[in-house]
């Protein structure tokens, strides 16, 4: 317990720094957009409705989706800018997070701004005209000071929303306090999840209270309170962001990882080997499955581990299964030709989709293979991870075996195993390298028709690092060095409930016995 | 040069199908105190606001001290014209002194001159000096309207426009303020146009009464002349009302 809190605390300066930088930037940008918009909308009644309706519409988009949508958009823009100006930009990480959070912060400031300005007593507005103020003088000297408390209340709401939603920038590759939550959810490290929630909530409360001082100061016309609040915000933000001032050096390697334990462990393994060469390494974790490959092809991450079957079906769009060796060979040639991506080779184990059942249940139903499963499927519930049912692998399996389940339910991988042991699912789409298969004594069903392609874990290197000798030499010893049993054990050491270790520790144990 | 303080020629204003002002002609000489009277909807407030450009007429021409209002930037025009209205409209985020100082500040007077002017004005409108630092919300209704008058007078305008300035005050305060303002008008040599629905107030304060009805001037003259010479039943009824009231008051109070 204490060890996990220590591990969480060690990550805090970096996570908090990025979280604050992101929230502050989004809020400032949001303020710069919504205040002029509020002034314009309060002047022009015909513009007011569409502007407010648009801002409300943005708010109805789930924040995670809003963040995710900016990635393909920016990727397209980056490609366009590359062709037009010969200079692209990163579509991953800070930029999509910033844009989405900025959009999110607009509504409360805009709505309160319009309410505040249009709510100024008409007699006072007439007096401002009567004493000879110009439109701008009226705005600055009368309307904005009188609307300030209402506007500040909107800024407080926006700040709380932005800080909360910033935790969702982790899956698009931006480090934030969300890293605790997403990593903790994957590895069932509830200390991390709680730590991330508490840190984010604490940050939101602090910002809210400081902004509240400014609001009270504006309402009671007490300059001292306003200065106190501003000073608190500036000092707090400065202190929080100081530790990350040295980050983002262009010379460092970026190691990517998707959003499950094995990926965290392998990313740590590669990062450690790269750091041993003296290089600076940053990590982009919790990437969505197809986001990771595109990020690599675009050079936003330098290296990560993917699986041959995934690349074969999702990236190349193939549905045939030429066999394990031929598939790897063809994949290596195709990815090089198409995207310039280097496939370094297999780590030595497979992490295939595997249909797994509890041993007692499989025995009772007489199920050994997917053919047997098809026979009893109408009475069974399938539990899968979130993406499996929309993947081509499922379509291939379904086409080959005609699996008509009574029900299909999606879970976070962690909860999928829970559902199986709890009887909420009868069969799950497990992963063959998952330590929980052996630990829970699950039965993996055979695939006599060869519908599921092989899933060798391979190291992929981005086009711009494909000729980087230092990187390639540092990682080459990992090729063929990890047997599936070792990977299962490492995964289980991170996933298990009692005595779990961090991915860093699991990565160290993964290769030390082989040495 | 036009020696008239104000001249309206064929001024027309419509709100949709409603004609608020129907080709109104009106000239006011410098130094006059004119009361605009009439029922609600007669167009008296609309007429007043065409003079400082708060309302733009649809037709006709308004000249202030010979200058065409339509051709003058409205904020520059308004800094030269005092404006007082029933709701007062003091800025709640500014002190009394800051409220009074607002127009001189817009005109970039130097701070010493402004401070001086504020003190002079407080004395002029019979307010104690110590209200200067207070917020408007800490004043009584009568005090607030005195500050309103002081603010309107701050930049030494020659022309004052007043829209039912004392309408929201209790009778005693109202009478006192009316008498005080009449004295100021004379002492400072102002030209004043005051909108009121209270005929007694108009008779007591103004040199000249202009009666408006449905956007047209029904009668125009000194109070006594109007009563003697007007044949219009509406005007006569209007003017005789305060006279009858005064007589009844005398009977009942036995003065």
Image (tube, rainbow, N blue to C red):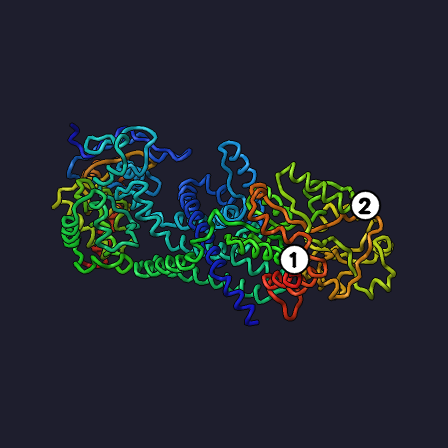
Q: Which quarter of the picture shows residue A132?
A: top left
Report the front residue among A11 and B37: A11
The mark that comes first in sequence, 1 or 2, is 1
Which residue does the numbered mark 1 point to in the structure image?
A: A262
Q: Nearer the viewer, mark 1 or mark 2?
A: 1
State whether discs 1 and 2 lie on one chain. Answer: yes
- Estimate how packed mark 2 is, as few (under 14), some (14 to 19) or many (20 or more) residues with alpha carbons within 10 Å: few
Q: Is residue A244 above or below residue A505?
A: above
Q: Is residue A514 left or right of residue B104?
A: right
Which residue does the numbered mark 2 point to in the structure image?
A: A399
At which x and y percent is residue A293?
62, 45
Q: Which quarter of the picture shows residue A431?
A: bottom right
Q: Is residue A260 above or below residue A92?
A: below
Tag 1 secondary structure: helix
Residue at 64% of width from left, 54% of height from top?
A478
Furthest residue toward left: B187
Report the front residue among A271 and B124: A271
Res A216 seen here: no
């Amino acid at each position: 317990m204490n060890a996990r809190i220590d591990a969480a605390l060690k990550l805090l300066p970096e996570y908090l720094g990025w979280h604050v930088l992101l929230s502050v930037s989004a809020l400032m940008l949001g303020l710069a957009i919504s205040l002029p918009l509020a002034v314009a909308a309060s002047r022009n009644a015909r513009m007011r409705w569409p502007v407010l309706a648009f801002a409300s519409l943005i708010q109805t988009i789930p924040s995670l989706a809003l963040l995710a949508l900016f990635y393909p958009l920016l990727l397209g823009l980056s490609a366009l800018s590359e062709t037009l100006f010969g200079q692209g930009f990163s579509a991953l990480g800070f930029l999509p997070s910033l844009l989405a959070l900025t959009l999110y912060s607009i509504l409360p400031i805009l709505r309160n701004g319009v309410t505040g300005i249009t709510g100024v007593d008409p007699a006072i507005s007439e007096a401002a005209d009567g004493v000879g103020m110009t439109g701008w003088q009226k705005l600055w000297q009368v309307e904005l000071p009188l609307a300030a408390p209402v506007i500040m209340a909107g800024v407080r709401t926006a700040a709380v929303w932005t800080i909360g939603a910033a935790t969702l920038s982790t899956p698009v590759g931006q480090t934030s306090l969300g890293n605790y939550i997403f990593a903790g959810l994957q590895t069932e490290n509830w200390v991390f999840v709680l730590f991330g929630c508490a840190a984010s909530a604490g940050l939101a409360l602090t910002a809210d209270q400081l902004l509240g001082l400014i609001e009270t100061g504006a309402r009671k016309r007490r300059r001292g309170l306003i200065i106190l609040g501003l000073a608190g915000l500036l000092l707090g933000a400065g202190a929080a962001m100081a530790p990350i001032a040295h980050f983002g050096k262009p010379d460092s390697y970026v190691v990517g990882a998707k959003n499950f334990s094995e990926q965290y462990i392998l990313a740590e393994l590669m990062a450690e080997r790269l750091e041993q060469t003296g290089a600076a390494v940053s990590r982009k974790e919790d990437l969505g499955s197809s986001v990771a490959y595109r990020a690599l092809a675009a050079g936003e991450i330098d290296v990560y581990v993917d699986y041959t079957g995934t690349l074969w079906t999702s990236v190349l769009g193939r549905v045939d299964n030429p066999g394990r060796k031929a598939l790897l060979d063809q994949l290596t040639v195709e990815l090089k030709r198409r995207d310039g991506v280097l496939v370094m080779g297999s780590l030595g184990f497979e992490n295939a989709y595997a249909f797994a059942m509890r041993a007692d249940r499989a025995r009772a139903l007489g199920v050994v293979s997917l053919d047997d499963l098809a026979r009893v499927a109408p009475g069974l519930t399938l539990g899968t991870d979130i993406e499996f049912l929309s993947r081509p692998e499922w379509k291939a399996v379904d086409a080959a075996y005609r699996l008509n389940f009574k029900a299909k339910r999606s879970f976070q991988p962690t909860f999928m195993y829970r559902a199986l042991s709890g009887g909420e699912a009868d069969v799950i789409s497990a992963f063959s390298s998952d330590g929980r298969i052996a630990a829970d004594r699950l039965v993996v069903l055979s695939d006599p028709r060869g519908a599921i392609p092989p899933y060798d874990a391979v190291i992929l290197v981005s086009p711009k690092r494909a000729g980087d000798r230092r990187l390639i030499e540092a990682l080459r010893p990992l090729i063929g060095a990890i047997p599936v049993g070792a990977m299962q054990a490492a995964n289980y050491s991170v996933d298990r409930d009692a005595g779990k270790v961090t991915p860093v520790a699991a990565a160290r144990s993964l290769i030390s016995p082989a040495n | 040069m036009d020696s008239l303080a104000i001249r309206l020629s064929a001024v027309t204003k419509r709100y949709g199908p409603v004609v608020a002002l129907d080709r109104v002609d009106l000239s006011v000489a410098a130094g006059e105190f004119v009361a605009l009277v009439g029922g609600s909807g007669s167009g008296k407030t609309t007429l007043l606001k065409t003079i400082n450009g708060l309302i733009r007429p649809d037709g006709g021409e308004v000249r202030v001290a010979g200058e065409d209002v339509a051709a003058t930037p409205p904020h520059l025009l308004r800094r030269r014209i005092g404006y007082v209205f029933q709701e007062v409209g003091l800025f709640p985020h500014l002190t009394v002194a800051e409220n009074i100082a607002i127009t001189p500040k817009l005109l970039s007077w130097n701070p010493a001159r402004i401070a001086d002017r504020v003190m002079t004005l407080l004395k002029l409108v019979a307010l104690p000096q110590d209200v200067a630092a207070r917020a408007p919300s800490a004043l009584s209704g009568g005090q607030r309207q005195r500050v309103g008058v002081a603010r309107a007078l701050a930049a030494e305008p020659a022309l004052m426009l007043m829209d039912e300035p004392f309408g929201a005050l209790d009778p005693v305060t109202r009478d006192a303020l009316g008498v005080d303002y009449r004295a100021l008008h004379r002492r400072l040599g102002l030209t004043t146009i005051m909108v009121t629905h209270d005929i007694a107030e108009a008779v007591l304060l103004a040199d000249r009464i202009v009666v408006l009805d449905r956007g047209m001037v029904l009668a125009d003259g000194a109070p006594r002349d109007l009563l003697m010479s007007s044949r219009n039943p509406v005007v006569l009824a209007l003017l005789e009302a305060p006279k009858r009231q005064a007589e009844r008051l005398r009977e009942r109070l036995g003065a």
